[in-house]
Image (cartoon, grey):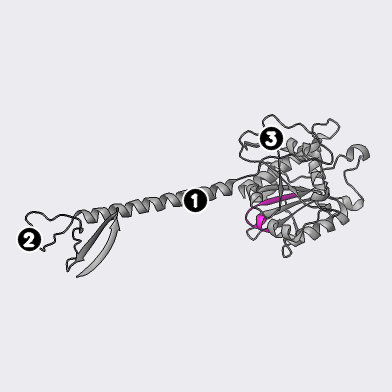
Amino acid sequence: MADIQYTSNHLSWVAYVGADDRPLRPLSAKKSPSEAPGQLHPWPRSRDILKQHLKDSLRVIFLMVILAASGAWGVLRAQRPFKEYPGREYTDFPVPPDWNHPFEWTRARLRVPGIFRGFRGGDSNWTTDYPRSDRHLLQGIRRLTRIDTRSVEQVVDLDDTDDVYNWPSMYAVEVGHWSVPDKQAVQLRDFLLRGGFLMVDDFHSTREWQIFLEGIQKVFPDRDIVDIENSDPIFHTIYDLDERFQVPGAQYLRSGRTYEMDENGRPEHWRAIYDDKGRIMVAICHNMDLGDAWEWSDDPRYDEKFAGLAYRIGVNYWIYDLTH
């Protein structure tokens, strides 16, 4: 027989375990009148106390796990609030009255350094057409789809935090002037391989294409840029867009030309970088300016056929992102 010391609910007791493994009564328990001197009898409540103690412990552990999981989920879902930044073209554009209403989706605008100086030093290339273009597009998405869309954009940074992963649909403009730091390239690659989507727009001719390549090849040095086939689902998610044409920027209103810079500014190129499963991760709109088309879509001088195609491309691309 062996002595076992145990403390439960501040009750110290000794059990003598015999051949039948029966727990015996605590030292503090009184003998019954019929009990012979020196005789110990089984104490049935000891097993109940052990069971209750175990249940209480498991209950506490379970609650701790739930609270920890809830806290982690809250951190994961934490999103930075909407914030407006001064743009190169607009500094006091009206904010829609419903800007803070609950929503299910919005398109993010990537803030990335330029080739001359980083955005913290005053570079404003990333703000081209911002925020007028963004808000016109979002109104179009509301009207043309059933997506519960926020009325304002979200500016995001590749700042080594998890915030970028809250905004899977991302747009970058003037990428013919960007300068992607190595650390940001690593996070952008991770974002895209996890299922994120990036649409780049408004860069023209050979020189800006080369600058874009320098940045995107830091992100994906081992993946090819290819022309998107007409049969690709991205051109058929909502609208069938086999027939496409060059969408010009606002300079068209002055020059009458649909292309920019030089003769290498045409024709338009619809290109992409795919992941290993055939999903488009980076949609590349070279030699066109869809951002200007959204921005100037409410100006009667800007041709409706250009604005109409720009909105259809936007709808198809973002629906593609949400369904692939």
Please give left or right for residue 39 compared with residue 286 in the image: left
> Local crowd at mark 1 within 10 Å, few (<14), some, or many (≥20)?
few
Q: What's the distance in space between the residues labelled 2 and 1, CA to CA?
A: 56 Å
| Element at label 2 | loop
| Identity of the residue drawn at 67% across and 44% down | 318
Magenta segment range? 189-199
Residue lying at the far bottom of the rendered structure: 1
Where is mark 1, residue-wise? 69
Between discs 2 and 1, the one toward the N terminus: 2
Q: Amino acid at mark 2?
A: Ala
* Residue designated by label 3: 151
- Marks 3 and 1, how far apart at CA: 32 Å
Mark 2 or mark 1: which is in front? 2
- Decide whether residue 25 is among the magenta residues: no
**Which residue sits at x=86%, y=32%?**
301
Q: Amino acid at mark 1?
A: Ala
Q: Position of residue 128 (x, y in %)?
A: 82, 43
Secondary structure, mark 3, is loop
Q: Position of residue 162 (x, y in %)?
A: 64, 52
Q: Mark 3 against mark 1, which lies toward the viewer? A: 1
Vertical position of residue 88 compared to residue 56: above or below: above
Given contact means CB atoms under 8 Å apart, are the residues at marks 2 and 3 in contact? Answer: no
Which residue is rendered at x = 74% and y = 64% of the image?
A: 221
* Residue 205 in view, yes or no: yes
Q: Is residue 195 magenta?
A: yes
Going from N to C along the chain, the mark reached first, 2 or 3, is 2
At which x and y percent is residue 228? 73, 53
Q: Nearer the viewer, residue 33 or 185?
A: 33
Q: Locate residue 272: give its quadrant.
A: bottom right
Q: Which residue is mark 2?
A: 36
